Amino acid sequence: MNINVREANYSDLEEMQDLFLEAIKNIPNSDYSEKQTEAWASTVKNKERWKSMLANQYVLIAEINRKIVGFGSLDKDYIDFMYVHKDFLRKGIASKIFEGLQRKSIELGCNQLTSNVSKTARPFFERKGFSIIKENNNIINDVEIINYYMSQ
């Protein structure tokens, strides 16, 4: 399996949003309820947020056979987005994206990375040396969604 990691561009936006929705809809019910994942998925409608992410953050895409299978974004020392297609979990894709984001943060002179991490992604970030700083109670469309502010 040949994984190509590259910087994202605006032409990737629609495929990235599709992957975002697909990833959220396939989160285990043990982590988040259907109501919670529906509220979370609704954030894809915030077009300005997505355009701003592409314009102002360092965004990496992982592709296999020109199909986007994962993406992640870095805002200075903060990992904002990190999503992998359900069919490609545990195949090293998130790690390749993470390594690229980490390299960029070092180039930018950052000493430590931070991120707001879902229950589902928490074990991955813990394996990368992150620890929980605090638990967040986010409200999206009147639905509470818990995640964790973590630091490496």
Image (spheres, grey):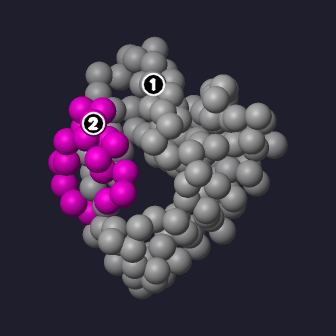
SS at mark 1? helix
Give me the residue at 53% from left, 77% from top: 38
Query: Can residue 101 be seen from the camera position used here?
Result: no
Q: Is residue 46 magenta?
A: no
> Above or below — where is 28 with respect to 131?
below
Q: Which residue lies under the disc numbered 1?
A: 99
Mark before the other along the chain sequence, 2 or 1: 1
> Above or below — where is 141 with respect to 97?
below
Residue 127 — which label? 2
The 10 Å Cα crowd at callout 2, few under 14, some 14 to 19, many 20 or more, is: few
Position in image of residue 60 (x %, y %) = 60, 33
Give me the residue at 78% from left, 36% from top: 66
In the rendered image, which quarter contains the N terminus? top right
Position in image of residue 52 (x %, y %) = 63, 48
Left or right relative to 149: residue 90: right
> Above or below — where is 10 with respect to 24?
above
Three-letter amino acid code at the position of disc 1:
Glu
Left or right relative to 74: residue 30: left
Position in image of residue 119 (x %, y %) = 32, 59
Three-letter amino acid code at the position of disc 2:
Arg
Left or right relative to 83: residue 28: left
Q: Is residue 123 magenta?
A: yes
The residue range painted magenta reads 118-136
Position in image of residue 113 (x %, y %) = 33, 32
Query: Can residue 89 be seen from the camera position used here?
Result: yes
